[in-house]
Image (cartoon, helix red, strand yellow):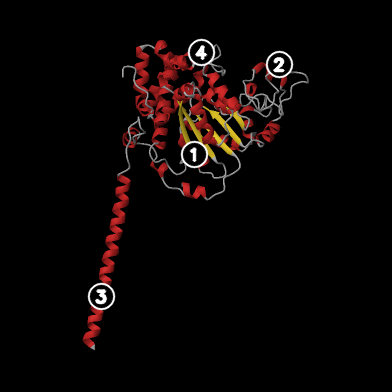
Amino acid sequence: MVKRRGARSLWLLLLLLYAGLMLFLLSVMLHEGWRGGRRSSPERDYEGGWNRSPLRRLCPHLDQSLWAEDGLDGTEEAAVSPPPRTHVYLHATWRSGSSFLGELFNQHPAVFYLYEPAWHMWQSLYPGDAESLQGALRDLLGSLFRCDFSALRLYAGDNLTSAGVFGWKSNKVICSAPFCLSPAGEFNSTAGRRREEVGLVEPKDCEQRCPARPLRDLEAECRRYPVVVIKDVRLLELSSLRPLLRDPGLNLRVVQLFRDPRAVHNSRLRSKRSLLRESLQVLRSRLRGADAAGRALQQQQLHRGGADYLVSGSLEVICQAWLRDLLLVQGHSPPWLRHRYLSIRYEDLVLAPHKELHRLLRFTGLPALPALEDFVLNMTRGASYSSDKPFLVSARNAREAMSAWRERLSREQVRRVEEACGDAMRVLSYLPQDG
C-alpha cells in the first residue's frame, strides 16, 4: 500500500513538473513570436509607401512616445457611437495650393468653412516663433471646432464681427442665405444666394450686400452644419494636434496637403513681400535649440539675409516638419491618428480632380455633388497658371502651374531646394530635376 502511494506521488510530481515546463516553453514562444512580429514589419520604399527605418534615422530626436498605445485603438473607437458632427483640419503650408483645396469644402453646402483663423493670433503675437505658438494654435482650433469664436477676441479685439473672420468676403456661409440676404430683386449678385448653389463669391458683392453680424450669430450658424472644416497654414507639425485627435467627442479628421517644394519655393518668391512676417516667425524656430553662439549667428543671418534668405530658410524648416509628419504617419501610424489621417499631393489633385475629390469626400463623410465635380474640373482648366492676385482663388491652368518652377527658378535655386528638402521629396516621390 505504501509503495502504491509512493508511486502515485512520484507520478503526480512528474506530471506537475511537465506541466510547468510546458507553460514555461509556451510563454517563451509567445514572447519570441511577439518580438519577431515587431521585427518583421515590412519596410516599403517611397514609391510603394514610406520606409520607416531611414526616416527614423533622419529624425533621431522625434518623441518616441507618440507611437505609444493610449487606449484609443480602432476597436475601442468602433464600440463608441459616432458623434453627429465631423471636424476636419486641412494641414498645409503657404503657397502649396491649400486655398484651392479649402475652396472645395467652402463650396459644399454641408460644410461650415473657416479660412485661416490663426492669422489673427500670429499677427497679435508677432514676432513669436512658429514652434512656440503651436500650443496656443491647438487650443484655438479646439474652441473654433466647437463653434466658440470668443477666443478670437483675445487676438483681434472685442469689436470683431463676421466682417473680419474666416476669409469672409469669399466665405459661402457668410455670403449666402440665410445668413446673408440680398435686397429684394437682386439677381445678378454672387452674394446672398442659396447656400446649395456652387460657385465662387465675388468679394465686392459680399462686401456690399452682406452687412457685418455679431460673432454670436455666426456661432449659431456654425452649429447648424454637420461638418466643420478649418484650413490653416501655421501648424508646423501634425503631432501638435494629438490632444484634439484623441478627443472622441471631437471626431477630428486631418487632411494634409503636400506640394513639390520647388513649386512652393517658386510661388513663395513671387509673393515674398507678403510672406516676410510669417517666414521670419518660422525661421526663428531654429533659435530655440541653439546655444548662445548659435543664436547670435542666426540672429545676424536673419537681419542680413534679406527677403530671399527668409523665404528659402523658412522652407527648409517646413520641409523638416514635413519629414517628421511623414515619419509619424508612415507604416503603422499611432492609435490616436489611425483612420483619422489622409494625405494628398497638389499635383494629384489638379491632374485627377474627380478621383481626388471623391477620396476627400469619402474620408470626410460628405456626399458627392455633380455641381462640385464640375467646379473642381473647371478650376483646374483656366487660361493661365497664375493670377494678378495670388491669394485669391481663381481658375488656373494646372499643368502650367505644376511646371512653372522649371522656367522661373535658376539651377542654383533648384539645387538649394533639393538639398534642403531632398529627404522629404524622396518620401513623397518628387524626382530631382536631373534624376
Residue 396 shown left or right of residue 18 in the figure:
right
Q: CA distance from mark 1 to mark 4?
A: 33 Å
Q: Which residue is mark 3?
A: 13
Q: CA distance from mark 2 to mark 3?
A: 96 Å
Residue 41 at x, y = what percent?
33, 42
Q: Which residue is mark 1?
A: 340
Q: Which mark is residue 386?
A: 4
Q: CA distance from mark 1 to mark 3?
A: 55 Å
Where disc 4 sits, the SS reads loop
- Of residue 65 and residue 364, the one placed in the foreground of this image is 364
Work out which quarter of the rendered image holds the N terminus and state it: bottom left
Residue 75 at x, y = what percent?
47, 49
Residue 250 at x, y = what percent?
56, 41
Q: Residues within 10 Å of mark 3 (few under 14, many from 20)?
A: few
For the point 47% across and 36% down, the residue is 341
Residues tagged 1 and 4 counted as in contact (Cβ below 8 A) = no
Q: Residues within 10 Å of mark 2 (few under 14, many from 20)?
A: few
The disc, 4 or 2, on the residue closer to the chain's N-terminal end is: 2
Where disc 2 sits, the SS reads loop
- Of residue 417 and residue 429, the one placed in the foreground of this image is 429
Q: CA distance from mark 4 to mark 3?
A: 86 Å
Name the residue type under label 4. Ser
2 vs 3, front mark = 2
Residue 139 shown left or right of residue 54 in the figure:
right
2 vs 1, front mark = 2
Residue 282 at x, y = what percent?
46, 25
For the point 21% across and 86% down, the residue is 3
- Of residue 54 and residue 153, the one placed in the foreground of this image is 54
The disc, 2 or 3, on the residue closer to the chain's N-terminal end is: 3
State the residue lying farthest toward the right: 184
Q: Which mark is residue 193?
A: none
The disc, 1 or 4, on the residue closer to the chain's N-terminal end is: 1
